[in-house]
Image: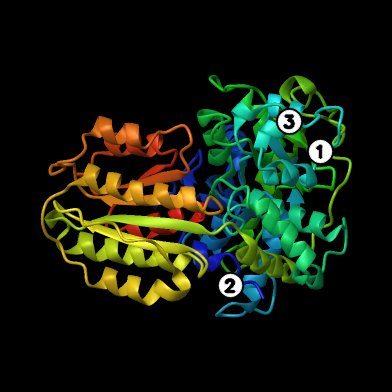
Amino acid sequence: MVRVALVVLVAAAACGKSGGPKQGSGGPVARPDAVIVRIAYSSEKKAWFDEAVPAFQATHPTTPAGRPIQIDARSYGSGEAASAILDGSFRAHVFAPASGAYVNLLNQTWQTGATPHAKPLSPAGEPLVLSPIVIAMWKPMAEALGWPGKDIGWKQLIAVSKDPRGWGAYGHPEWGSFKLGHTHPEYSNSGLLAVLAEAFAGAGKTRGLARDDLAAKSTRDYLGAIESAIVHYGKSTGLFTDAMLARGPGYMSACVTYENLVIESYGKPGAAFPLVAVYPVEGTFWADHPYAILDAEWVGADERAGAQAFLAFLKARPMQQRALALGFRPADSSIAMAAPIDAAHGVDPKQPQTLLEMPGADVLGALLDAWRHEKKAADVMIVFDHSGSMEGEPLTEAKAGAKAFLESLGDRDSVAIEVFDDHVPPPPEPVELARARPALEKLVDDMFASGGTALYDAIGASYKVMAARARRDPGRIHALVVMTDGKDESSRELSLDQLLAQLAPEDAQVKVFTIAYGDDADPRVLEQIASAGQGTSVKGAPDTIVQVYRDLSAFF
């Protein structure tokens, strides 16, 4: 059974919270007679929707009853969109994820969750556009594996990742080890379909994947072999691909993404090399981007009519041609394939040659269970500022956020908490949560606010501990998660420049994620620290910090 599919880890992915959905173009109008059609759509379509919504509104659409139609479209990760609908934080009339797999999971949770429903919430929906799941690789690295003349698949990626010589086995020792990325399958469609494609390859199938296949040792071992090459996971396919482009081949050799994002990368300056799309020879999936008008009590006849009108607009030839220009394959088969679906943009219009069959929700639930056992385990140090300025609600909510982060991690993950103010105690060693969870939760409960802020010293001391662990055990994701509500005022050992130099060795295996908590934190400095540590910086406040911590758990 799906673990209340996608809701446990993404619960309360509410609108407007840090790391949550982005408001699309065309928010609700003031006219009291307007029909507001709320659409939760996957973030990969954002550029298209940002054009489509105002273009639709410019036609002054109305329902058959004459009421004006207003589109309120918001972009999410596909798993986040499902969660926002299920927890009521965004009462969408239309669910438009990247793949029909999330329609299956949405319905599974709707019908088997805490409040079971007799009928499915979502129909299958109509495909809006198509984009295959691909492995985006830097062109020289793909060529080293034989691209474009040789078929490449998961088997080749396992071989290069397991070879102790790394890329040296292919004539490029300067490239180091093979580093792979895909998003977290409980948050993001591309991550879910990546893991599903890995499982099909491990089972040696293209159809009929069953729960027994996922329980087989050979399949589990295959999954584990691929997942061992992961740098870290992520929440959004677009942001994940952008991070790869910004940080270059030393950060990540390849990531699982959408063909349209490979095409989109050709319009972004500064990349070290072009990306190319590898279509796994074992098979892949179409991201079919269904548009499903929900069968829910809050979807009335006028909302349904407005949703149908916007669907017709998106499926009409002008918007389908615009989707093609943005790198999607049109759902309208009468539109001929043309640029940018071409070799000049790193893709092959004749691919994919082998398509995999989408299983039902029960198999997807078993897949997520298998992945949790075989995923790359995390080794995390939470660096927690409990200085005097945290007194009251800020500390109460920050403690709740830290506990939510612990809850989101698995028993195989190891965690330690370094609590600092103007004093930085020797950082503890992370311990597996299977043994340490109650003690860590008590440590959080027992915190109180006091002292100043020795931020740089705390990060530096914690980083040394984690770097040593990374050298001893490179088979884990190693990271710092740093939360502070203020500026450094008490460090004695390190300046900012010294800390940044410490975080940026060429062989860095520890990622640094920072949270700027409240108005007094310095986001510029925390962004510098996260950038040096090849992580991410986010902002939080007392009313959003729990969700911020949950969002960060998607990296692990």
Which residue is denoted by mark 3 in the rendering? 170
Q: Is residue 57 visible?
A: no
* For marks 2 and 1 on the same chain, the one whose residue lies earlier in the sequence: 2
For image coordinates 58% across by 64% down, the residue present is 6
Vertical relation: 548 (above or below) 145: below
For image coordinates 38% across by 34% down, the residue present is 532
Quarter that holds the N terminus: bottom right
x and y, in percent, of residue 498 in the image:
26, 32
Residue 239 relative to residue 161: left or right: left
Vertical relation: 26 (above or below) 451: above
Q: CA distance from mark 1 to mark 3?
A: 14 Å
x and y, in percent, of residue 38 in the image:
55, 52
Q: Which mark is residue 152?
A: 1
For image coordinates 44% across by 38% down, the residue present is 534
Which residue is denoted by mark 2 in the rendering? 4
* For marks 3 and 2 on the same chain, the one whose residue lies earlier in the sequence: 2
